[in-house]
Amino acid sequence: MFWLKVADVALFTFHTLIVLFNCTGWIWKKTRRWHLVTMGAVIFSWFFLGIWFGFGYCLCTDLHWRVRIALGEKVTEQTYVQYLVERLTGWRPNADLASNVTAAVFAVALGLSLWLNIRDWRARGSGSV
């Protein structure tokens, strides 16, 4: 039981940091390449693994839910963002709202990351960086 509790805290921490990084990692020049990597991993999970496990499948969420179930918790959230918001604020948004906001923020962050990474790559090629 001790290790399940450790895993619960570790997964909550890791997954929350990934979510926050995916929202903001495009901002800093030094993290932009890593941001594309983590965004690519999310796309891979949501769309490629989603072929087998359902659209929007997240490996981190799946692992965390399995740990929570093993701890005897009843998992009633449909998305990790729903769980995160409720755990941090006490308010649970409905699943559609959580999914729509997640998709919108993800799309904006991905667009900004692609634009800034391409701009940085071009600037390096011209020698202005």
Image: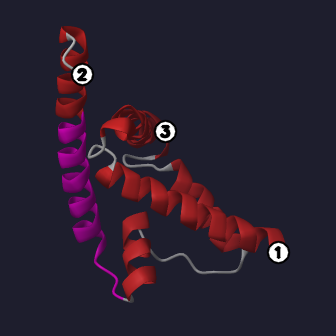
* Label 1 sits on residue: 2
Q: Residue at x 81, y 68 (%)?
A: 3
Name which of mark 2 and mark 3 comes first in the sequence.
Answer: 3
Q: Which of marks 2 and 3 is in front?
A: 2
Q: Which residue is drawn at 37% across and 76% down?
A: 85
Q: Which amino acid does label 3 sit on?
A: Trp
Q: Is residue 21 above or below residue 81?
A: above
Dot 2: within a 10 Å radius of its alpha carbon, few (fewer than 14), some, or many (20 or more) residues? Answer: few
Give the image location of residue 21, x and y in percent: 39, 52
The answer to the question of whether label 2 and label 3 lie on touching residues, with beta carbons closer than 8 A, is: no
Q: Which colour scheme is used?
A: secondary structure
> What's drawn in magenta, residue-wise?
91-113
Considering the numbered disc 2 on the image, is that residue within a helix, a strand or a loop? Answer: loop
The answer to the question of whether label 1 and label 2 lie on touching residues, with beta carbons closer than 8 A, is: no
Left or right: residue 29 compared with residue 64: left
* Label 2 sits on residue: 129
Residue 23 visible in the picture: yes
Considering the numbered disc 3 on the image, is that residue within a helix, a strand or a loop? Answer: helix
Q: Nearer the viewer, residue 3 or 24?
A: 24
Dot 3: within a 10 Å radius of its alpha carbon, few (fewer than 14), some, or many (20 or more) residues? Answer: few
Image quadrant where one finds the N terminus: bottom right
Q: Distance between the residues labelled 2 and 3?
A: 43 Å
Q: How far apart are marks 3 and 1 (CA)?
A: 32 Å
Give the image location of residue 127, x and y in percent: 22, 12
Q: Which of marks 3 and 1 is in front?
A: 1
Q: What residue type is labelled 2?
A: Val
